[in-house]
Image: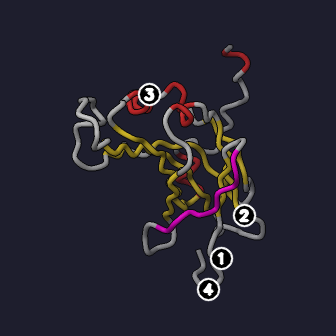
Amino acid sequence: MNQAQQPSQVLGVLIPGGGVRTDFLPTDNSGTKFSLVLSGISGADIASVSDLVFFLLPGVNLPIDHGAMLYWQIISAPDQTSMDSTPFSNQPSPTMTEFELVGAITNDRPSGSFRTGWATNETLSTAINSISSSITINLGVSIEHISNIKNVGAMNDNTTHVAKKI
């Protein structure tokens, strides 16, 4: 992003039924990586989130031939008051999963509604059902060249044939 013209916030996310979140924080000095911890939603409520809306804020453009890829990961912190043992509770410090791709936006497609898959994610289900840990979802964003985004298939519309699978 052009450092001279970079607005303080460039991206937004909306969980249907919730408020718009624009408080992505930079995670590197290049200005191409951001994160947002989804606070205020936890436990079984996380699994009920079937879609996220990810968008560029009005008046914001990404660098030419670039897009923003949205990822998610689980952060599990052990509950210090419980001694139960689960894969997510026997660690003395928070455990984080690898990031998983949600979708991508570009200047030509500045917003998108993306399926999370959280309701059927086995790792997330295990973490939610662990009574000895608390979990949160961390969203990550990476500004990437459009060729990288196309290469991983992040611009595909995966909702075209949803009804055919029911």
Residue 101 falls within the magenta-colored stretch: no
Q: Are marks 1 and 3 in contact (CB under 8 Å)?
A: no
The residue pinned by badge 4 equals 4
At mark 3, the secondary structure is helix
At mark 4, the secondary structure is loop
> Which is more toward the observer, 101 or 153?
101
> Which is more toward the observer, 97 or 29?
97
CA gap, disc 1 and disc 2: 10 Å
How crowded is the residue under tag 4: few (<14 C-alpha within 10 Å), some, or many (20+)? few
**The magenta stretch spans which residues?**
18-26
CA gap, disc 4 and disc 1: 9 Å
Q: Are marks 1 and 2 in contact (CB under 8 Å)?
A: yes
Q: Residue furthest bottom?
A: 4
Q: Are marks 2 and 3 in contact (CB under 8 Å)?
A: no
Q: Nearer the viewer, mark 3 or mark 4?
A: 3
Q: Earlier in the sequence, mark 2 or mark 4?
A: 4
Q: Identity of the amino acid at label 4?
A: Ala
The residue pinned by badge 3 equals 125
CA gap, disc 2 and disc 4: 18 Å
The residue pinned by badge 1 equals 7
Figure quadrant of the C terminus: top right
Residue 45's spot in the image, x, y percent?
56, 35
Residue 109's spot in the image, x, y percent?
73, 53
At 27% from the left and 32% from the top, the residue drawn is: 87
Q: Nearer the viewer, mark 2 or mark 3?
A: 3
Q: Are marks 2 and 4 in contact (CB under 8 Å)?
A: no
